[in-house]
Amino acid sequence: MLDELFYRIFESLPRQGPGDPGSTRRALSLLPGLADDLAILDLGCGSGAQTLDLAWVTRGTILAVDNHQPFLDMLAARMAVEGLAGRVKVMNADLGQLNLPSRSFDLVWCEGAAFVLGFAESISSWKGFLKPGGCMAMSELAWLTDTPPQEARDYMDQVYPAITGMEGNLEIIRSLGGEDLGHFVLPEAAWWDAYYTPMEMRLSAFAEKYRDDGKAMELIRHLQQEIEMYRKYPDAYGYVFYVAQFA
Ligand SMILES: C[S@@+](CC[C@H](N)C(=O)[O-])C[C@H]1O[C@@H](n2cnc3c(N)ncnc32)[C@H](O)[C@@H]1O
């Protein structure tokens, strides 16, 4: 029931994590050059907000992977409507157990899903899918200040203790053989426009509906608290896009 409510909320959102088309394009612009037949692996694609942007801006093919089938069905339907189905395929798989040929992609893309394995583990597991000289573009949560407020620290200790600073993530990239091609902080609007604002509207409606259901209210309050924390501390933490090339 709780899973059902969780997915009901997330399936109804334009995207399932912070991001926006401008940031996707900006990350793409940091790549050394886009071949015509670019093969992209989009990991943790969700319902495919960034997959669609990648499909419009690049040429070649995209394999979009997630383990929640309804997201993949939404993505596939959308690609069909947009006439992109020939270039975009979906695959239901676990990010930690991808059965894909090594050295077969020019670009591994991951918006907001590296937390599933952890930033370092994601890079180590996925870089083998890149052709030599291929690139990885990933967005990941990071502290934006050396002195985050205590309340934000306490919150992250509970929800994402692995969070580190931008420099810490760049060090991880370098230690795993990546060359930093550029990185930038996603704008605050990338959290609000297609993610927290629509989520907040749904949460208020569901709070009415489920007010007598303790478990549902716990989930709703947890998500509301997440939004409140970001509203309070947008300068303390954020999503950072990292683009790196691997030999
Ligand atoms: C924060 S969402 C990001 C979705 C999308 N990239 C976006 O920015 O809208 C994380 C995604 O990872 C997927 N996911 C979580 N754990 C996974 C796993 N073990 N294997 C595959 N996908 C997973 C979720 O279903 C979800 O779609």
Image (cartoon, helix red, strand yellow):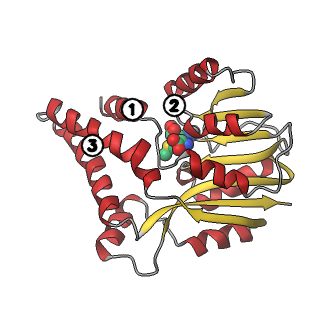
Q: What residue does disc 2 label?
A: 68
Q: Which of marks 3 and 1 is nearer the N terminus?
A: 1
Q: Which mark is residue 219?
A: 3
Residue type beneath disc 1: Tyr
User: In the drawing, does residue 232 fall left or right of residue 211?
Assistant: right
Q: Looking at the image, do the residues carrying marks 3 and 1 touch, with CB atoms under 8 Å apart?
A: no
- Circle 2 crowding by C-alpha within 10 Å: few under 14, some 14–19, many from 20: some
For the residue pair 101 and 151, the one nearer the viewer reads as: 151
For the residue pair 161 and 200, the one nearer the viewer reads as: 200
Using the rendered view, name the quadrant where residue 103 is placed: top right
Of helix, strand and loop, which one carries label 3? helix
Where in the figure is residue 79, as x and y percent of width and height? 63, 23
Q: In this rendering, is residue 44 above or below 230?
A: above
Q: Earlier in the sequence, mark 1 or mark 2?
A: 1
Does label 2 point to a residue whose CB lies under 8 Å from ligand 1?
yes
Residue at coordinates 83% horizontally, 43% vertically from top-left? 102
Q: Which of marks 2 and 3 is nearer the N terminus?
A: 2
Q: In this rendering, is residue 15 above or below 26?
A: above
Q: In this rendering, is residue 210 above or below 162?
A: above
- Circle 3 crowding by C-alpha within 10 Å: few under 14, some 14–19, many from 20: some
Using the rendered view, name the quadrant where residue 56 is placed: top right
Q: In this rendering, is residue 118 above or below 63?
A: below
- State the separation of the CA atoms marked 1 and 2: 9 Å
Q: What residue does disc 1 label?
A: 7
Q: Is any atom of residue 125 visible in this view?
A: no
Q: Residue 96 carries which label?
A: none
Where in the figure is residue 28, as x and y percent of width and height? 70, 51
Q: Quadrant of the N terminus?
A: top left
Q: Looking at the image, do the residues carrying marks 1 and 2 touch, with CB atoms under 8 Å apart?
A: yes
Of helix, strand and loop, which one carries label 1? helix
- State the separation of the CA atoms marked 2 and 3: 19 Å
